Image (spheres, rainbow, N blue to C red):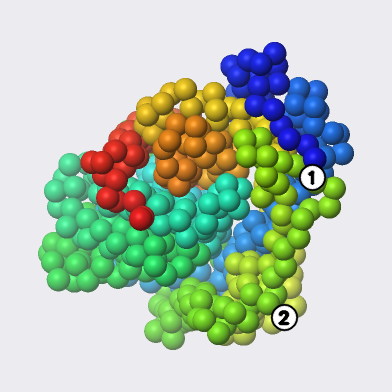
Amino acid sequence: MFQPVLDPLGGSLAWSALVAATPLLLFFVLLGVLRLKAQWAALSALAASVAVAVLAYEMPVGQALDSAVLGAVFGLFPIMWIVVNALWIYQLTVDTGHFEVLRRSFSRLSDDQRLQAVIVAFCFGALLEALAGFGAPVAISSVMLIALGFKPFKAATVALVANTAPVAFGAMGTPVITLSRLTGIPLEDISATVGRQTPVLATVVPLLLVFLVDGRRGLRETWLPALACGVAFALAQFACANYISTELTDVVAALAAVGALVVVMRVSRIGVPGSARGGLQPPPIIAGGSEDADPADVERVRAKAEAHARTGSDDRPRPDDRPGAGESVDRGATVKAYIPYAVIIVVFAISQLGPVKDLLAKGSTAFSWPGLDVADPVTGEPAGATTFTFNWLPATGTLLLLSGLITGVALSVRPGVALRTYGRTLRQLRWAILTVATVLALAYVMNLSGQTTTIGHWIAGAGSGLAFLSPVLGWLGVAVSGSDTSANALFGTLQVAAAKSTGLSPELLASANSSGGVLGKMLSPQNLAIAAAATGLGGREAELLRKVVGWSLALLLVMCVLVYLQSTPVLEWMLPN
């Protein structure tokens, strides 16, 4: 049995930690400085981690490579199994025109651009994050905002900042599920702790969005519905993450947020179409000066947004046959547009019922990964990460596949069209699949060889200050990798190792990695490129970065202070017992 040594280089923990961090440093430099594509940066870092494992930690070559295979398999199932099926459901709504109906229904909720930003970028963006994640909310929300009259730069900025609070529970809980699997901390503990951190962000973000759109005036005139939206999202996110379902957290929170927003708008008459208190309404568009694109670009992108759900291959419904083709949309078409999300909620809710849950559990099997015989470097017990759980029936991805099949029937999608859409989704995600599989392979090699534990013990030298710095590590990981899932895979085990060495709560620091990570999303090169491409602002990624970096750092400071106080008696009561 292979048992890693924490200080393999001459008994020096510092030098060993430096060598152990080499794969991560290489990954960050290749991706963030040399701007190499994520999949090639991850593959290079994986090769470096195998070399360090074999040469520095004396891990047998076969076991090092086997660790990489196990990590890659975990990246494919259950991680990308979730993402593929979630994005497939979204593509079905686009191909049938129901996404366009949904967009139009949002525009009828309010003609005030400040509240449209909250509805589309925050509420609907959270729903998209729940289903797909991985950049989809930013791309889709920004294009929808342009279609509603926003100028491209403003739309991209709003979409980037809004994509924060929901990220930890995105893609049906993929980041926290990954964090739980890799650290060995029960999912309910991770989910509950993150669910007591990110709601603080959720309360603030809608207020920040109306400020971005209209400055102090926007905040003064629309603070009430924006605050109601944020509080509703925060309370729903807390309740669902702690007591209902990790996977459904963002879905429930998004629906609760838009519901609260609409109710407060109707009662206060703020932002209601046709109301004297409607506030800022199209066609006047807030924002001006050098940050806005040429008017021709605005029209081109607006036309692209309108055509997004009406054009494509011959197997898609024709414009005249689509429910979103005309300006007027009947109530039945609007109800149909919401069917996919209702189906997902119902399917996941039923799966949590006792008898159903027990039945689904029969489609799960766990086994020790062949060829891996690794002991924990501290306890000497067999490493828990060498056990692979193939829960094909109760897996989130499988439930999403079932939801997609039901959605296809409900929306009268022909089987051939649904199958071709699935194939197109796989092609669209092919590089993301490779990247995630490679990053998970890197994480498993570093974890099982002892590299992560070495770094964790070295970082533990920060003592009690580690609680304050913990979110920064997750923020850095997401800012570079563009994925909270990847950052959790890279640093989750490290945070737990450091926590155990300092006497801090492993659940707190592991969760802080994910909660802090969500604030790096708006700075990641991938998200900036996605936002720029979707809004016709290619080449202006640096301008977008300068626009959002201050907000990212300010919110990160809030999270650092919150986590530090949660590690002390001051806010320790916020954590699960």
Q: Does 263 sit left or right of 27 as displayed? A: left
Q: Residues within 10 Å of mark 1 (few under 14, many from 20)?
A: some
Q: Residues within 10 Å of mark 2 (few under 14, many from 20)?
A: few
Instruction: Report which quarter residue 394 is drawn in.
Output: bottom right
Tag 2 or tag 1, which sits nearer the N-term? 1
| Label annotation for residue 415 | 2
* Distance between the alpha carbons at the discs numbered 1 and 2: 45 Å
Q: Say what secondary structure mark 1 lies in.
A: loop
Residue that appears at 67% across and 57% down: 80
In the rendered image, is residue 442 in sight?
A: no
**In-front residue for pair 290/189:** 189
Taking depth in this image into account, of 66 and 335 the one nearest to the observer is 66
Give the residue at x 56% y 56%: 177
Position of residue 375 measured from the top left corner of the image (x, y, whole percent): 71, 41
Which of the pair 27/431 is nearer the observer?
A: 27
Task: Answer above or below: position of 232 versus 524.
Answer: below
Q: Nearer the viewer, mark 1 or mark 2?
A: 1
